[in-house]
Image (spheres, rainbow, N blue to C red):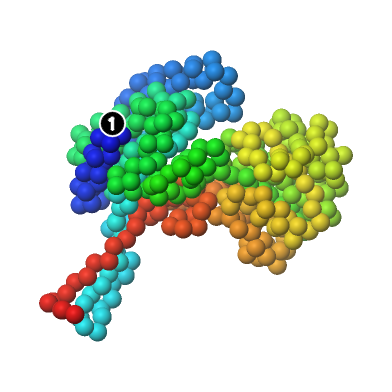
Amino acid sequence: MELTAMGKAAKAAALRLNTLGTQAKDRVLSAMAQALMDHMEEILAANALDMEAAGENGVPPVMLDRLRLDEARVAAMAQGLRDVIALPDPTSETDYMVERPNGLNIGKRRVPLGVIGIIFEARPNVTADAIGLCVKSGNACILRGGKEAIHSNLAIAGVMDRAAQAAGYPEGGIQILSDTSREAAQEMMRMNGYIDVLIPRGGAGLIQSVVQNATVPVIETGVGVCHTFVDASADLPMAAEIAVNAKVSRPSVCNSMETLLVHRDVADVFLPMVFPMLEERNVELRCCARSLPYAQKGVAAIPENYDTEYNDLILNVKVVDGLPEAVEHINAHGTRHSEAIVTRDYDSAQTFLAAVDAAAVYVNASTRFTDGGEFGLGAEIGISTQKLHARGPMGLKELTTYKYVIYGQGQIR
């Protein structure tokens, strides 16, 4: 089978990557960045095939934006690889070294995870980001993208793999699956012994399928039912700007806001302020009974709305009696991704930070900042919404584990 052969090749490459130094990996990253620029026409031609097919299949405009590549976006992928070069290599770190009473020196050294499998949907830039991060962290990778972006993904991965091998990267270290069937994905989920960890990136359906069916260890990522709570003490013009940004700047991504919560004491001032700003940007409002009268074109929300990641210009709005109700709502309906409070009250801010269970919790800022680049981590491989091993934007360090290294002078026990 294709996947078994890929798994064997990746495993062999991963063993060689354990000894690849930082300078060698940076040369590979530089070569891959240049190759993306040199082969831009090839990549854009492949993307045009995907865009044409997506248009014929009725893919919504907001999802077409995630799929579309242009010269600027390809250049941004190349720059992302150069940015990774500038980041510290986590595999060059030793977390600590201690000398025991018997003279043994025991250290904890960062090492690659090994072979990382990534199953993702229609965002071709994920291909470049994932490969770049795996190269710098010393991991082999097997990628499986969605059918919507298959031509783009194969072109990007092919260009990068050829450049990497020419720069000394082992064959099998970068691989992409051409089979986009569900059966191939399910087989990949059970590649124990070949894949060390599987990372899904996409919608709720994909992520839950991987979490429920994989026998390979999984890092759960991505689904973002994110909230912004406007507290009674909030600077309301600032709150309006934050809310609009969190919803409309890029509604198709996982860190966009899906529900706006508003303290009852400011609802009669804030909602008439923010609703026109949202409606003029074509946001469809789904409102609770207390907020609906303020909306020109709003519709009544139903309970299911509060658990939905729209990835679109749709927003739930709910008036709450105070901070406790806001926190209770977020912890009941959020996906542990990104949550925000707008407030001028220090105690309210600190209560929100402590009580809300999420990977990223904001005070007076948009949830749209939950991103590896914005956090100074460089490109990211995903936003982990679980608690073990990694949480939040997953940069280079999150793609490593550790081993203990012990230096002795003949000690026996």
Question: Residue shown at 30%/53% (left/top)?
Answer: 112
Q: Is residue 38 above or below residue 303?
A: above
Q: Is residue 201 left or right of residue 248?
A: left
Residue at image mark 1: 1
Q: Nearer the viewer, residue 227 or 183?
A: 183
Using the rendered view, name the quadrant where residue 353 is placed.
Answer: bottom right
The residue under the point 12% across, 77% down is: 410
Quarter of the image with the C terminus in it: bottom left
Give whichever of 361, 31 is nearer the camera: 361
Q: Amino acid at mark 1?
A: Met
Q: How many marks?
A: 1
- Image quadrant for the N terminus? top left
Tag 1 secondary structure:
loop
In the current view of this chain or complex, which residue is farthest to the left? 410
> Does any portion of residue 378 appear in the rendered image?
no
**Image location (x, y in percent) of residue 82:** 35, 41
